[in-house]
Image (cartoon, helix red, strand yellow):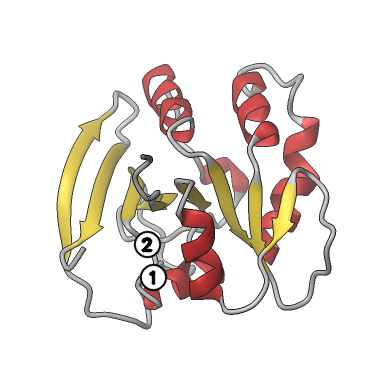
Amino acid sequence: MRCMGKVILHSAVTVNAAYEAPSPEQWLELDSDSRDANLAQLTLADAMLLGRKTYEGLAATWPNLGGVPGMEKFAERINAMPKYVASRTLSAPLEWNSTLLEGDLTESIAKVKENNSLWVSGCGEFAQELAKLGLIDEYWFGVHPHVWPTGPRFFDGFGPLRLDLLSTTQYKSGVVMLRYRPANG
């Protein structure tokens, strides 16, 4: 019998938890070790769980990245994965191997999670809503060696939330991967 899956939030953030770069050239710090680790982490999930904005952005980009050097394995994995999309404005059917979640968000995710570990990419509105609803089982933050004075921060506007540290990994780029789970989970 298969164990129930998890909802795993995976995001790159700065030291002060900003998740949107002031400009593209200020983001991301990657080395071969952290890139390989990110791909290995991605393969742990059975499917992606996305909000509308992330779905639209990724669906417009990832199908075209298969031939980009260094991105081939990521594109192959991401494009092949099933995707579950939460939206109040999109209509089924969706493209890019995607299924629209219908009905109550908590119930829809619980049903999909019965047989799948779900990968949530990013820290935007949808990820914040999942956190507020207590639907995230693990938080995986790639903390990059930057501090930005402006921009949205993941945990602004809600809490308190106590997290238990599961692991840390430091990469030569200065990135530190932190894995947490909610203390009540």
159 versus 86 height, above or below: below
Determine whether, in the image, residue 154 is placed left or right of residue 70: left
- Tell me which residue sits at (47%, 58%) in the image: 19
Report whether residue 124 is seen: no
Residue where numbered disc 2 is placed: 136
Q: Position of residue 119 (x, y in %)?
A: 49, 48
Asked if marks 2 and 1 touch (Cβ < 8 Å), the reply is yes
Viewer-side residue, 132 vs 97? 97
Q: Position of residue 17 (x, y in %)?
A: 35, 60
- Tell me which residue sits at (45%, 70%) in the image: 130
**Disc 2 residue type (three-letter):** Ile
> Nearer the N terminus, badge 2 or badge 1?
1
Viewer-side residue, 93 vs 13? 93
**Is disc 2 surrounded by few (<14), some (14 to 19) or many (20+) residues within 10 Å?**
many
**Disc 1 residue type (three-letter):** Ala
| Secondary structure category for the residue under label 1 | helix
Residue where numbered disc 1 is placed: 131
Q: Quadrant of the N terminus?
A: top left
Q: Position of residue 142 (x, y in %)?
A: 36, 43
- Tell me which residue sits at (43%, 18%) in the image: 32
Q: Quadrant of the C terminus?
A: bottom left
> Separation of disc 2 and disc 1 at Cα?
6 Å
72 versus 13 height, above or below: above
